[in-house]
Image (spheres, grey):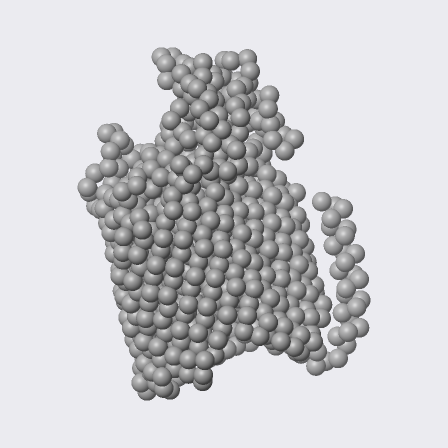
Amino acid sequence: MARYFSLFLISLLSLNCYATEANSDDDKNEGIRKLLAMDLDQLLEVTIETASGIEETLRDAPAAMVVITEEDIRRRGYSNLTEIFADLPGFDAMQTGSPLPVLGHQRGYRTSFMQRTLLMINGIVDNHLWSHGAQISRQYPISGLKRIEVLYGPTSAVYGPNAFLGIINLITEDGGSLKNGETRVNISTQLGSYQSRGAEASIQGKHGDWRFNLSAKTFRSKEAGLNDLASWGFLTNEQLNNKNTWGAILGLGNEGVKYGEYSDPTKDWGVLGEVRFRDFTLGVIAWDAREGYGAYYAGDRVQPNVYWKHDAQQFYLKHDYQANNKLTVKSQVLYHANRIWGGWVEAIPDWNENKSAYSYVSISDWNSLNHSWLLKQDYDYQFSKELRFTGGLKYEAKTLTKAYDICSYWSGTFCSSGDMGEGQYGQGAGVFHSTDPTAVIMPSTTGSIPEENLAHTRDVGTYLQVLWMQNKWHWLAGVRYDRNSVYGSSINPRLSAIYHWTPETTFKFLYGKAFQEPSPVQLWGGWLGRTGNPNLKPEKAENLELIIMHKQKHWLHDLSLFAAHYKDVIKEEAENAGTRNIWGVEYRGRFNYPNPLFKNAANMTGNLYYTYTKSLSSITYNQTTKTWLDQTSELGDIAPHKINLGIDIPFDQHWHLNWRTNYVSNRILYSRNPLREEGKIAKSFTVSNLTLGYRQKIFDLSFTVKNLFDKEYYFPGGEQADSGDDFFQRSLGFRNSLIPAEKRSFWLNFRATLN
């Protein structure tokens, strides 16, 4: 760590000498000062594109939204998406320390994976084809982003399936703001606790008819160790290294570390790029996230020191055709491939009498491969100054894995390497006992999925929107029809009325429906402990919302009141089970004041968010009978109250301090969690992060302390959250009922911009 810090200091001193000479003029320093804070009028009129699929201002957007600008990212010291999620309103963001580092429950809807929020990059959906999950990790480069648009509420009327709870759209710089012949390069590096290190580079250019942007990132970390986490009785070295539990497994390992030692390695990388020539754009999205299992699972059930991997490759070609001064046609063809695969080391308590201290053990190899072809065509017709029509067509052909390809595991699973037999215990070829002298490791998956384990689906969709501006009113009406070859068709309408009462005050009335596809992993991907269900129906959402926006001299107020109804809810056991009713209040405030501490510095800016959420489910779990009952109760894992406060205070033209504090109230646990029946809760916590930044015209350096006061706190567990907390016996299930959070950590970020 000391060696890396020395390199940072050398780079800082070198660039500081250059920047001091280059920025000696007062007007250049004044330019930096103006850059430090976006005026509230500018923020209200910022152009966004996620709400309706067309460019419009934040004030005119028919949706509740938060926009995170490039300047926000730099001044808050963000280096990846996981940090950004903790500061967003309307999300119960859990840092799981697993191959899904962030589990974000948007607007009070608990989900096993982050499946019901669309993650997009320049409007291209990047959720996994097989799980529908958004892989929020450290693989995406963010130094080349122009802004992040976060949308709340259903938008299936525009985007079709899975635009269920909201959208996160990463918008990259495209070189359009550059002068002709200009090229800009950004480089950034990160060092942090847990031997973490990352590097990013991005380049944008504009040369005649050509525009381009390309960004890349790599991140490596050993992640938090047991001493860096809040204490939890099912995560101890004694459990991981217990010979009775693990037997011969303890002689093996991964990444040079033996099983039995807590290790949670991470290797991530990603590339985003677009090249535009006149009306044509060629783009790529490619990334690979390899993560250990961290604190998500109980240590007497799972060894965390194994890679679980997600990847994606998308290649697309766009053509924007201006037919005349009224009609624009946008065409797109896209190829999407991704994979979920990796290793898994588990121990299941021996069910024979007086043998629960021992285990049936396996080390297995898992795989799934999926790809799709997508064709889209969108139309935008400006009939008159007041009336505008938008619409489009979509066709997508998918080839999907059915059941997980799992080798060296229990009986009844599909293995592409062939049937290995039942093994010495009659449970499967890969299963051995913790008393056996040697571990059993059978052949791995072949790397390809046989045709008999593939499903071929077809999706078609079409939508139409009408936008009408009438004096102070902006009206929108839209409807979309989608049909899938597996689960049938769905029709989803959308209505909004926006009234600009005064230049400072706007009212928005929104109504929309959406549907969530059953994911292939739940339709067919069953394994021991999770049964696929090919009869799953799509979930349905209906949302009604009132938004009030009001700008004062120093404040921009943005208030949402919403009520949402969900039916045919798909829960973790791959069943359509009951309904959910959720209502809430979201306040999204931004402020900009003259600096009260340093008169010659830029304004003090920041945000204040408050979220109230009430979530009810029509079913609840009975821990005694181990069955679900038709009984309305609180859903659980959703905090009724959340507060996000951020303040940025410039000291002068170069130095600034950024403070971010997040409060999460007490929350009842999910009814499937055995701790709920015992009356236990996930206790409230307040966590503060502090960033000290130094900024010159061409570079900036920031030092961040996360969890400044070294608070010990816990997140609710994921999926069934079924381990319990009786640490004097074996856990009740695989997933920890509470997930211990990271304690205090330190991070150094350096970024330089060269023209």
Q: Nearer the viewer, residue 449 or 102?
A: 449
The answer to whether residue 267 is above or below residue 7 is above
Residue at (27, 42) in percent of width and height: 535
Q: Number of labelled discs?
A: 0
Q: Is residue 369 visible?
A: yes
Q: Residue at x 42, y 18 (%)?
A: 422
* Residue 143 makes an appearance in the image: no
Left or right: 718 as drawn, with respect to 708? left
Residue in view at x 42 percent, y 24 percent: 410
Q: Residue furthest front?
A: 451
Image quarter of the N terminus: top right
Q: Locate residue 265, reporting x and y percent.
A: 59, 38
Q: Position of residue 522 (x, y in %)?
A: 35, 41
Question: Where is residue 345 drawn, in percent x and y?
Answer: 50, 28
Q: Nearer the viewer, residue 412 or 582?
A: 412
The percent position of residue 584, horizontal first and vertical second, equals: 31, 59
Q: Quadrant of the C terminus?
A: bottom right
Residue closest to the far left = 630
**Can you tell which quarter of the image residue 501 is in?**
bottom left
State the residue at coordinates (51%, 67%).
318
Q: Is 170 displayed left or right of 64 in the figure? A: right
Vertical relation: 319 (above or below) 413: below
